[in-house]
Amino acid sequence: MNLIQKTSILSFFAILISPLIQADENYRPVKDTVVISECGACHMTFQPAMLPQRSWIAIMSDLENHFGEDALLSEQTNQYIKDYLVENAADQQWVGARLLRGLSNSITPLRITELPYWEKEHNEEVSTREWNNPKVGSKANCVACHRHAERGFYDDD
Amino acid sequence: MKLITSKIATRKKTGRRLPYTGLLTLLVLFSGMSNANEYLDQLHQQTKQSDIGFSGFSATRGESLFVTQFGTGKPNTPACTSCHDKNPTLPGKTRAGKPIEPMAISVNPQRYTDTAKINKWFGRNCRSVLGRECTLIEKGDFLTYMISL
């Protein structure tokens, strides 16, 4: 087998497996209509697999002070959403393990953007100028750059 | 032949059903509007009972409530217009970047059709912006303004 043949075979396999290597930033999107309508009224419906259980419990226990706003829900709705988030949290599925990499168990992050993994993924790639773009507005606005974020796809970077 | 007859029968049925569908649509539209007015009526009754000097709600006061920079609530939301557009017939934007449907009932008839939803948002946003619950008069003025546009 000559070099050209070898290279073409190798490239063929590289192309074949490349989607598998890239397509790893996928999270199961939220399908629950209550969660979508309540959380999604103000911000993107973040996938529960993006934070550990302890974070969701902390967030849902203080909705009066929800990132600078009062987002109080009825007790019943609050419990329903909290259960959903806890059941599908990062520490409940393998896809979340990578996201929690480097996070100490003694820390309860309240924002996805506080995760060491998130910081690593964004700090080098996204400039201050891009963050300050009025179309982005907030680091919570994933869809500004990840067009299909709401559907759980974050590979488009 | 049988097939054709049944087809005609179906067509007749649909034909008869159509005006009802139109009527139903109108009913849904108007029930939405009357719901906002019903809510306002309730506020009116409650305010009359608790305030003898009450002479009615005012759209002008509602407008001023809507645009005033209070700064007595949470730091990031000093006014309603921190998120809603100053012009209630235009959409606003949440701090997380999501669009907010216009507040004026004329351009958004779906507004104020669900009592639980009205109460939820008056509660949240009055506490966020003013740092307290809104009074009955404030709520009435606000709704009167949004209906008047």
Image (tube, rainbow, N blue to C red):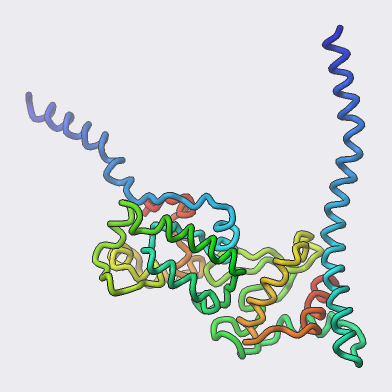
Q: Which residue shows up at 22% across the image and 31% down it?
A: A12
| Residue B11 visible in rendering | yes
Q: Is residue B76 left or right of residue B52?
A: left
| Quadrant position of the C terminus of chain A in the picture | bottom left
Of all residues, the one furthest to the bottom in this rendering is B53
On screen, A141 above or below B128? above
Count of residue discs: 0
Residue B44 on image: x %, y %: 87, 79
Q: Height in image: B33 above or below A30? A: below
Residue B149 seen by the camera? no
State the image coordinates of residue B89 (x, y, percent, origin top left): 75, 67
Q: Residue at x 28, y 57 (%)?
A: A98
Quarter of the image holding residue B94?
bottom right
Observer-nearest of A100 and A58: A58
For the N terminus of chain A, give its image quadrant: top left
Looking at the image, which is closer to me, B99 or B126?
A: B126
In this view, A32 is above or below B73: above
Q: At which x and y percent is residue A43?
A: 53, 64
Left or right placement of residue A58 versus residue A36 in this view: left
Residue farthest toward the top in the current orientation of the protein: B1
Image x and y of residue B105, in percent? 79, 65
Q: Residue at x 88, y 73 (%)?
A: B41
Task: Left or right? Give the position of B43 relative to A146.
Answer: right
Residue B141: name its quadrant.
bottom right
**Residue drawn at (88%, 18%), measured in percent from left and top?**
B8
